[in-house]
Image (cartoon, rainbow, N blue to C red):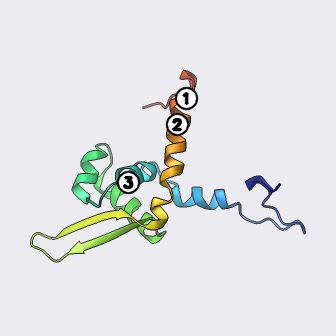
Amino acid sequence: MTTFLDDQGSSGDHQVCPAELALRVMRGRWKLMIVRELSGDGRRFSALQRSLNRVSYKVLTAQLRELEADGVVWRCVYSEVPPRVEYGLTERGQALLPVLEGLHAWGAAAPPAVVAEE
């Protein structure tokens, strides 16, 4: 049986583990929380920023752009006055939701010594 830890070629060539690639896409303090917030319908930038109350405008913008470039988030600009921009999860982003649920369950079962520092 092959596992995600067996991603090294038989010739000794190092292949990048798919889990490592996934972690590269999700690298960033706010990305998992952004995906969580977008798990329902599309959300406006201001609503996202309010729900993630400690994220700066600059960081949220950068992380949304990275998620969009990686195909996790879609962005729709409506030609209205004032302009309206909404974000949501692509099909690829929706595929992350079971992973987030697993992380949530794991974190809920974590012993107190593992509780995140705020």
Asked which secondary structure carries label 1, the reply is loop
Q: The disc labelled 3 sits on which kind of residue?
A: Ser
CB atoms of marks 3 and 2 within 8 Å: no
**Which residue bears the numbered disc 3?**
39
Q: Is residue 84 left or right of residue 102?
A: left
Q: Estimate the x, y position of residue 53 in percent, counting from the top left.
A: 28, 43
Q: Nearer the viewer, residue 25 or 41?
A: 41
For disc 3, the neighbor class at 10 Å (few under 14, some 14 to 19, many from 20) is some
> Nearer the N terminus, badge 3 or badge 2?
3
Q: Nearer the viewer, residue 2 or 28?
A: 2
Q: Estimate the x, y position of residue 108 in percent, counting from the top left.
A: 50, 31
**Which residue bears the numbered disc 2?**
105
For disc 1, the neighbor class at 10 Å (few under 14, some 14 to 19, many from 20) is few
Looking at the rendered structure, which numbered label has been put on residue 109? 1
Residue at far top of view? 112
Compared to residue 86, the image places residue 2 above or below, namely above
Asked which secondary structure carries label 3, the reply is loop
Q: Is residue 76 left or right of residue 20?
A: left
Q: Nearer the viewer, residue 111 or 113?
A: 111
Q: Residue at x 83, y 54 (%)?
A: 1
Compared to residue 94, the image places residue 13 above or below, namely below
What's the CA distance linking mark 3 and mark 2? 17 Å
CB atoms of marks 1 and 2 within 8 Å: yes
Q: Estimate the x, y position of residue 96 in percent, counting from the top left.
A: 50, 56
Q: Residue at x 31, y 64 (%)?
A: 87
Name which quarter of the figure residue 75 lies in: bottom left
What's the CA distance linking mark 1 and mark 2? 6 Å
Q: The disc labelled 2 sits on which kind of residue?
A: Ala
Q: Residue at x 80, y 56 (%)?
A: 2
Residue at far left of view? 81
Asked which secondary structure carries label 2, the reply is helix
For disc 2, the neighbor class at 10 Å (few under 14, some 14 to 19, many from 20) is few
